[in-house]
Image (cartoon, rainbow, N blue to C red):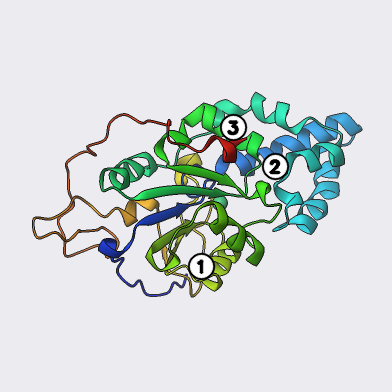
Amino acid sequence: MSSAALEKLDWDHIDTILLDLDGTLLDLGFDNDFWLDFIPSVYAASQALTLEQAKAVLTPRFRACEGTMSWYCIDYWSRELGLNVEALKRTQAERIAWLPGAQAFLKRLRALGKRLVLLTNSHPQVLKIKDEQTGVTGYLDAAISSHVFQAPKESELFWKAVREVEPFDPQRSLFVDDSPPVLRAARAAGIRWIRGVRRISAAHGGQARPLRDYGDIPAVESVSDLDPGLPWTDGRHGGLEEGAGHPVPSVPPTVEGVDDSHIRPAVLR
Ligand SMILES: [Mg+2]
C-alpha cells in the first residue's frame, strides 16, 4: 500500500469540513452487501435466474454506470431492474451503521465551532432512510445530495454548483471521502485539504475488506485519525493524524445532544 505523506492539518485555518457519507461516516458494508448480494438475489428470483446468472447480468450493467449520476440513482435502477429499490432498501435498513468513531469526531468538530457539511452522491431518498436510522444529519450543519445538481461529486460541475448553495472557502476547507476519483475532483476544484479514508467498513470485524489504497492522495484509517483533539492552553490543537507527539485527549466530546434545527430543509428533500 502506498500513500502520500501527510501534511499536518492546520486546524486554526480550517473553518469548514466537507464530508462524504458512505464509507466515510457510515459503514460501506451496508451498500456493498445491498448491491452485490441482496439486489442480485432479489433480481434472480424476479427473473427466474440462478444467483450466479443474475450476477453475470448485473455486474457489467453496474460497472458501466460507475461514477455517473445513474449509478447513484435508485429511480434509475428501479426502472432498469423492475424492482422498487427504495422499498428494498427499507427492508434492510436495520443494517445501516456508523463507522467506529465517526459520531465522536463530528461532536468534537462541532464543539470546536467548525462548520460541518455533508456532500453525498447518495440519492435523497436513500439519505433519508440512512438519516432515519442513524440521525446523521443532526450532527451536521447542512446536507447536500449531488442529485440536486444532477452532477456527481466526480464532476467539475458539482464543485462549481455546490459553492452556489454552500459558499465555503476552498482554502479553509477540509474534504474527506473514500473515493479516489471524487478526491481528485475536489483537489482539482481547489480544496486545500483532502483526506481519503482507508477503513470503509467495520463489518465482519473489519477484516473482510482490504484497506483502500489512495496512491498520491493523503489518507487516514478513519475519520477518528483526523480528530483535532481539545484546544490546548496555548490555543493550538493537538491531533491524532501523525500518530505521535501529542497525548491523546481522553475527555469525551462536550456536545452530547444534537440539534438539527439548523439543517437546510431544501437540500434534504
Ligand atoms: Mg463514499
Identify residue for label 1. Answer: 214
The vertical placement of 15 against 242, above or below, is above
* Residue 128 numbered tag: 3
Q: CA distance from mark 2 to mark 1?
A: 23 Å
Residue 36: percent from left, percent from top: 70, 44
Q: Is residue 230 left or right of residue 35?
A: left
The mark nearer the N terminus, 2 or 1, is 2
Judge the density around disc 1: few (<14), some (14-19), many (≥20) Cα neighbours within 10 Å.
many
The mark nearer the N terminus, 3 or 2, is 2
Q: Quadrant of the C terminus?
A: top right
The mark nearer the N terminus, 1 or 3, is 3
* Residue 35 numbered tag: 2
Residue 132: percent from left, percent from top: 53, 27
Residue 28: percent from left, percent from top: 55, 45
Q: Indicate the amino acid at tag 2.
A: Trp
Task: Identify which residue is drawn at 52% across, 28% down.
Answer: 133
Q: Badges 3 and 2: C-beta atoms under 8 Å apart?
A: no
